[in-house]
Amino acid sequence: MAQTVLFIIIAAIILISGILAVTTKHIMRAATYLIFVLFGTAGLYFLMGYTFLGSVQVMVYAGGVVVLYIFALMLTGQHDNDEKVPAATIKKAAALIASLGGAALMLFIFISHKFATTVLTAPSEQLTSVKTLGTQLVASDKYGFLLPFEAVSILLLACIIGGLVIARKR
Amino acid sequence: MFDFTTVSTWFHSLLTGVMPEWLAIGIECLIVLLFIIILYATLAIILIYAERKICAFFQCRIGPNRVGKWGVLQVFADVLKMLTKEIIKMRQSDRLLHDMAPYFVLVASFLTFSCIPWNKGLEILDFNVGAFFFISVSGIGVIGILLAGWASHSKYPMIGAMRSGAQLISYELSIGMTMLVVILLNGSMQLSEIVQQQADYGWNIVRGHVPAVLAFLIYLVAGNAECNRGPFDLPEAESELTAGYHTEYSGMHFGFFYLAEYLNLFICGAMAATIFLGGWAPFYIQGADGFNSVMAAIPGFVWFFAKAFFVVFLLMWIRWTFPRLRIDQLLTLEWKYLMPLSMINIVLMALVVCFGLTIN
Amino acid sequence: MEKRNYFSGVGHALKSLTIGLKTSIKVFFEHDETEQYPENRKTLHFSDRNRFCLEMIHNERNEHHCVACGLCQMACPNGSIHVYSEMVETPDGKKKRQLVKYEYNLGQCMFCNLCVRACPHDAIRFNQDFENAVFDKSKLIMQLNHPGSHLEEKPKPAPAPRPAAPAQPAAQSAAAPAKPAVAPAKPVAQATEAKADAAQPKAASTASPAQAVKPAAETPSVKPASEAASPASEDINKES
């Protein structure tokens, strides 16, 4: 009962902020609404008992990515006075195709997995404890995540080196 | 040591005896909320008073001494003044974001505040990822500061917010890494578990010796920077930016920033006390049983507050001693000195734990 | 500043930071320097060189040294001093100038001390009364000679001009060495003053002529100096 009520509240927050984020004319406000969407998502994770995932969501997205967005927006100047340019036909068509495709995908998942009938229950904290996650992350057995983990580290290393190369003094 | 869970379970059973469980939980939530808010306000008042007095003593002054005995009512007078002041509206500013920004800072502060274990069994938010949650929600404050700087539509707040963003993001790394050192030592992210271990095996700063002391020192430096306090107070450097990111705020909106700033100071001290100085765990000496029983008779929250305020005093001592850094010096300190040091420190602590070199 | 390598830089930084912390904690436990003003009125101490308000020196018999020569009035760059005098006949038949009212406007004074230096008889000095704030500008205009006071009678019937240096009070001697160029000129000024004292017509012209002929009967209507000065300090008391 309580879970459902909370879910509805969080879902409403996510939906409303999501709609506001794409309809607002000020880019900074859009970024702020995006924060609420991400917080809502984190709230869903907490609701489901995935506290680690929720914390990661807050830290990486709200604390990291959006701060980066805001920083970038602040550094690139004022956008409020931009002239509204009518979108080209090809852009409109692309947007339509993308939204239709996304909607179809969502619909397919909804229908095939019967979300509406599944009761939401919080799993125990032990199931999703940090210890389990940590062990799984560096486990090399069949369901371990060592390979993706290392692949991501190489990617990040490449990013750091790339950044250094671009930013180095000549 | 007195376990607070006996009180909470007794209260819960008392409530569920007369009403359905959802109502009981609702009432308990309200009580906890009230508790947090009252404690928050009280601590803010104590801290502002303490800061003004301690700052005065460091400068050979007396500090507030006119309103009430020793000026104790000064802060109340200031709060009243702040509450009755008008919240100004500016023409060019983004009203929505401008009004929203203080709440981001405040919410971040409240969430981190709720993570602190006050006593044995007296925690409000106690996840198995407590320490991680603490770090992640403390990052929300940056958004508030950046939005405040942007929405004010003024140069000073903008520069202040940019500095603050750079500073907070950088020093969050050091905070996270010093916390990792403690997590390594205790093998748990749950803050109540970390404190329990310290009650059983001795305080982390003793148990982890060299790496723990190093981590504590790094934490003090990075904590001061995270609180936007001197010598790292360049986001609000009054001599150059008037008040930094909250220049354009008035009334209680400014009050929220002010409140959050002081509470962040306390939270910083409280977290240092929790992860390094044993939280509510009393001071034990191996073998001295009489002494230990006396120490154990002192309630846990007294220990906790004593330690937290000790660290707060250390932070104030640092603040009122050193001159402000330049932004490049600030970033150099973090990225060239503290970061490598804390990385080495993690490896050191891993070795200490791995080879069982801990004391006890 | 010399260039240090990374590690010795860290060591040096730690050392200097420790010195800073040590210094500040020492100060923390030191005695506070703050003067708590309204409470410490009794013990409040100012340096002798502080100049707050001009006063005329009166002895216990309510006598002063002022001969109403008007040199202070001439010396004052702001025109904040007005000496009102009258001519009286002494019992032995001599005509003599006598002080009626010494008016001093604190609001115009810039505390330059030129009047004190100009005075040949050390009749005036700057005192240490610092609570001079008032709500009414007219209260700043004070009468410095006390009501009923008169010139101190010297044992010698005709007071000869004294040499300047030994007669200087302590407050003035502190300032005197700072202005060596003025000091030698002083005896000359005093000599001329003494001459002026004898030849009265010239001196009368220096002390505003219109006032000089006013009758002595007006003196009681002039506000007593003590009354003019005391409300000022009372106002401060009320405020605090």
Image: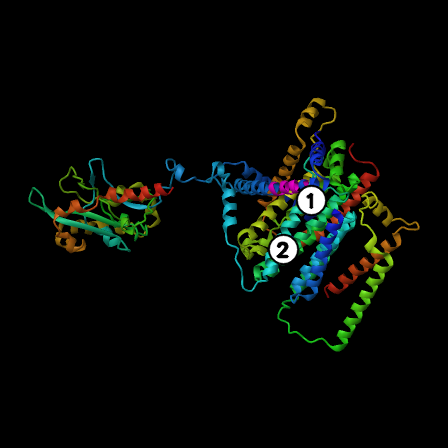
Magenta-colored stretch includes residue C185: no
Residue located farthest toward the bottom when viewing the structure as drawn: A89
Q: To which chain does the residue with label 2 belong?
A: B
> Disc 2 residue type?
Ile
**Residue A88, placed above or below residue C138:** below
Quarter occupied by the C terminus of chain A: bottom right
Viewer-side residue, C78 vs C147: C147
Viewer-side residue, C29 vs C65: C29
Magenta residues, start to end: B28-38
Q: Secondary structure at mark 1?
A: helix
Residue B123, percent from left and from top: 70, 39
Magenta-colored stretch includes residue B33: yes
Q: Secondary structure at mark 2?
A: helix
| Quarter of image, res B18 | top right
* Tag 2 residue: B145
Q: Residue at x 80, y 50 (%)?
A: A120
Upstream in sequence: badge 2 or badge 1: 2
| Residue B293 visible (yes or no) | yes
Q: Main secondary structure of the magenta part?
A: helix
Judge from the rendering whether residue B179 lies leftward or rightward of residue A146; answer left or right.
left
Judge from the rendering whether residue B102 lies leftward or rightward of residue B282; answer left or right.
left
Residue B347, percent from left and from top: 80, 45
Viewer-side residue, B254 vs B356: B254
Q: Give the alpha-carbon distance from disc 2 to disc 1, as whole Å.
A: 22 Å
Residue located farthest toward the top when viewing the structure as drawn: B290
| Quarter of image, res B8 | top right
Residue A59, percent from left and from top: 73, 52
* Tag 1 residue: B219
